[in-house]
Image (cartoon, coloured by chain):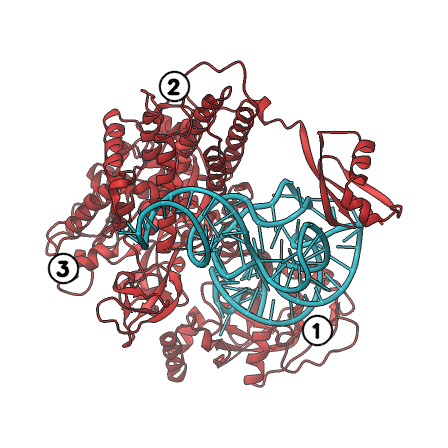
Chain colours: A red, B cyan
Amino acid sequence: MRDLNRHYNACETEAKWQAVWERRQSFHVCNGDPRQKYYVLEMFPYPSGKIHIGHVRNYTLGDVIARYKRACGYAVLHPMGWDAFGLPAENAAIEHSVHPAKWIQENITVMRTQLKSMGLSFDWSREITTCEPSYYYHEQKMFLDFLDAGLVYRKESWVNWDPVEHTVLANEQVIDGCGWRSGAFVEKRLLNQWFLKITAFAEDLLEGLDNLGAWPENVLLMQKKWIGRSEGLCLFFDLIDRNDRLEIYTTRPETIFGASFCAIAINHPLASELAKNNFNLYKFIVECNRNGTSEATLKFDKKGFDTGLKVRNPLADDHELPVYIADFVIMDYGTGAIFGCPAHDQRDLDFARKYNLPVKQVITPNANNIIICTEAYEDYNENDLMINSELLNGLTVGVAKNLVINLMESKGVGRRKVNYRLRDWGISRQRYWGCPIPIIHCSSCGVVPVPVKDLPITLPEDVNFDKPGNPLDIHPSWKHTICPKCGASAKRETDTFDTFFESSWYFARFCSPKETECGFTHSATDYWLPVDQYIGGIEHAVLHLLYSRFFTRALKICGYLNIKEPFVGLLTQGMICHETYKDVDGHWMFPTDVKRQHDGVIVERNSGRSVILGRSEKMSKSKKNIIDPADIIATFGADTARLFMLSDSPPERDIDWTTVGIDGIFRYVNRLWRMVINPSIELPPPNTKIPDVFCDEAKKIRQCTHKTIDLVNKDLNKFHFNKAVAHIRELSNVLSGMSNTNDDGTGWALREGLETIVRLFNPMMPHLSEELWSALGHDQLLVDNTWPEIEQELIIENNVTLAVQINGKLKGTIEITKDADIKIIKEKAMAIPKVVTFLNCKVPNKIIVVPNRIVNIVL
RNA sequence: GGGGGCGUGGCGAAAUUGGUAAACGCAAGAGACUUAAAAUCUCUCGUCCUUUGGAUUUAUGGGUUCAAGUCCCUUCGCCCCCACCA
C-alpha cells in the first residue's frame, strides 16, 4: 500500500475543516438576506443504504456551483433532504423484518455522515425528510386544495398493474411495457384510482418549455414529445341500425373517402357492451388484455374482430364501413376509436390486407396513381392532390383538410380538436410506505375529504408485511373511522400517494422547512424561488421534472406560489460507468474481486481463475460493477474524489471510472500541496503591498494569473468544469516552471499566482484550498473570502499572433500589435522566409486579412 | 417504425463557434536520483517520409468557401428518447 506519510494528509485535514465550517455555520443562510439570492439544488437522494458514486458526482457538481456563487457574493440556498417514502423501504421490511421507518432512519444516518465527509456546503439546518408527518401533513392539505380546485378526480380506469410490486404505476413509470423499478411486465387492470389533472395544463406545460432556455435541448424535446400535441378532428359516425353514434379522432380528415373500416379499442364501451352477448368477442378481448399492447414484437401482427356493425360516412350516405375491434387501437388516446384509411396509413394497410378490406388511394403526388401494394403512401405533403374523393377531387391536401373540418362542423357531426398524448397522473398506490390519501369513504355520503383539522392522517406503526397486498387494507383498525359528514362508521382510503408526490414540491419546502401552519410562506418562496440551478440525472426528464412543473402550476392556482416554473436552469449529469466482470460460471463479479495481471489479462483475485471482461456500463448493484465512494474518500480524501469527478469530462457526459484515473488526480493534489508548502522562491508575507516595479518574468506570471481567472470565470459560468480544471493546471505548470531568482516582484507574483490557484480551486477542493490558504499565512477562512478579481489591464493583449497561410495551409506566424494596419500585416506576412521560398517570386492573387485572426495568401 | 444526438491520437478530452487541430490530463517510452524499487524530477509522444525539413491527419466519400473538426449532401458505425398516439 501507498506510504501516505509523505503525502498531504487528506483525512485529517478534511475532518479539521469540516468541523470548523460546522462550528461557524458557514453555510447557513437566512430568508430575506440582503444579498442577491441564488438557489442551487441537487435532486435529493432516496435513502437506500449508503451513497453511491452517482451521488458523489451529483453533489460535487452542485457544490462547485454553490461555493462559486457564494464566493461571488450571492446568498446561496443549498439544502439537502431525503426522499424517504417508496417501495425499497417496504421491500427491505419484508426481507429483513425491519420496519420501513427504522430502515430509512438508519440509512439516513449513514448517508448524512457520508455526505458530510464530502465537505458539501449544505445548510443542514434546512434538512427535510418526506416520510415525517411534519412534511406530509402539508401535502395532504395541498391534495384537499387541489380537490377543491377541481384538479383531482377519482375514476374507475384501466391501469398499469405491476404484478411484482402489487401496485399501480403511472404511464411515465412504465418503460417498454415493464415496471420502471421491478422490470416486470405490466398488466392492464380496471381499478378505482385517484388522478391529478395534469392534462388541464397540457398546453401551458408545452408553451412553458419555450421559456426554459437554460434546460438541455434533449430534455425539452422529450417533454414536448411526451405531451404530444396534435391537431385534428373529432368526428361522429352514425351506427347503422342502432340509435347511436361512434366518435373517432383523426389528424387526417382529408382521407375520409379513403376510409374502409372503423376500429375501436378492446376496452371501448361499445366493445364491452357487445361482448356481453357475444362469447367469441368476450374471449377475444380477454386474450388481448392478457397479452398487453406494448410488446414491440406484437406490432406487426394486428388482431381484429368484426362486430358486424356498420357506420355511414357523414359525407357520403352510400359509403358504409364495417366496425372492427382491434388490438392496435388505444383506449386512452383520442376517443379510443379510429377510421382506417389503408392507402395512407401503414398500420391500417397491414390490417386491411389481413382482413381483406378495400384499399382506396385518395391522395396522389403527381396526378398519376401510384400502386399501393404493401407500402402505404404516408408522407404526402400539403400540395398533393385529392382523387377518388367526390367533392374533394382536385383540391390540394391542405385545402381539403380544412374543407372537411368545416363541413363536419357545419353539419354538426364533428369539431376541430387539439389532442394530447399526455394523460392524467394516476397517484394511487396500493402500498403502505407512502403518504396516506386524506379521504374517507362513507356508504351514505360517498367520498368525503378529511377535514383539515384532522390532518395529518398518519400511518399506523404496527403493520404486518407477512400477507400479500396493501398492509393498510389488512390492518385491523386503521381504516375504520367515522364519516366527518354524517357520523356513521366509514372507511379510510387505504391507497397512498405515488412517491413522486413528495418530490414534486420539496424544492419549495426548503424555503421555510420549519414552518408548521403552511408548507411554505409567501415571503420565503417569493424570495428563494424559482430554483436557479437544478442538477440531477437525465432519467427524470419526463417523470419528476414534468410532475414538478405541473405541481408548481397547481400550487399557483391554489394560492401557494407565485411562479409557474420551478427550475430556471437544469444540468443533467452523465452516468458513471465501469467495466463489468463475470466468472466462468457467468456470475457477475465486483471490481474488488478481480485483478489485472501484468500481461493485461484479468483474473479472479483469490483463485486466479479467468474472468470474462464485459463492456463498460452504468454502475449498478445488479451487475456488481460498483466502486464504493466511501473507500475512495478513505484512501484519497474527498477533494481527490471531487476533482476526479470534475476533471477530463464535461458534466453531462458519461464517464468511465478507472483506478489509474484517480491515482493521477491524487498525484496532482500532492504536487500542488508541495508547491505551496515549499515554494520555489521565497514569498513575501501575506497582504504585502504591491511592488512598484516588476521584472519581465514577474509581469508575465501576473498576466498569466489574471488571464486564468478570466478563463475560469467563463468556464464555471458555463459549467465547463473540466476546462476550468485544465486552465488552473496550466497556471500551476507556469508557476512551477519559474526560475529560481529573486528579481523584482517575482516572489510577489508567485504568491499572487499560488493564492489565485488556491482560491480558484476552492469550490472544487474546499478542504485542500482552505488548508493551503492557511499555510500561506492567512488568518481568515477562505470560505469567507471573496472570489478573485481580475486586473483588467493585465488581461488586455497588446500583441497578437497571426497565423499566416498560403492557400489555407499554415506557413508561419507573425507577432504584431493588436489592430495593426492591414498594409503592415501584409508586408510582415510576405516577409516570412518560408512564405518567400514558397512563393518563389510568384505574385499572389489576393491576400485575405482577418484582423487579429489570420492572414491567407491566395495564389 | 418515428424523433433526436454523436463519431477528433493508444485513452479521457480541448479547439476563441468558419480562422494556427490535438490545450489540459491519463497511459506509454527514454533519462536523472536510488544498491534496487516506489515516489519525485527532466525529455519524447497523431501518422508517414528521403527528418536543421517536408507531406499528411478530425468515421467515409463528395460539395460550398480565401479558409471546414465546425455549414450542406452520401455512405458506414454508435448512443438516447418514444414506440400500433390515428
Discs 2, 1: same chain = yes
Q: Amino acid at mark 1?
A: Val
Q: Quadrant of residue A457?
A: top left
- Distance between mark 2 and mark 3 Cα atoms: 59 Å
Helix, strand or loop at disc 1?
A: loop
Total numbered badges shown on the rendered structure? 3
Q: Chain of mark 3?
A: A
Discs 3, 1: same chain = yes
Percent position of residue A783, x then y: 35, 27
**In this rendering, which labeled residue sits more in front, label 2 or label 1?**
2
Residue A339 vertical placement versus A662 (above, below): below
Q: Which residue is painted at 49% across and 58% down in the image?
A: A421
Q: Chain of mark 2?
A: A
Discs 2, 3: same chain = yes
Helix, strand or loop at disc 3?
A: helix
Q: Residue A536 versus residue A480: which sits nearer the camera?
A: A536
- Distance between mark 3 and mark 1 Cα atoms: 65 Å
Q: Which residue is painted at 43% across and 35% down in the image?
A: A530
Percent position of residue A214, x then y: 52, 41
- In the picture of the structure, the residue carrying the numbered disc 1 is A362
- In the picture of the structure, the residue carrying the numbered disc 3 is A96
Q: Residue A10 versus residue A173: which sits nearer the camera?
A: A10
- In the picture of the structure, the residue carrying the numbered disc 2 is A686
Q: Residue A338 versus residue A817: which sits nearer the camera?
A: A817
Q: Chain of mark 1?
A: A
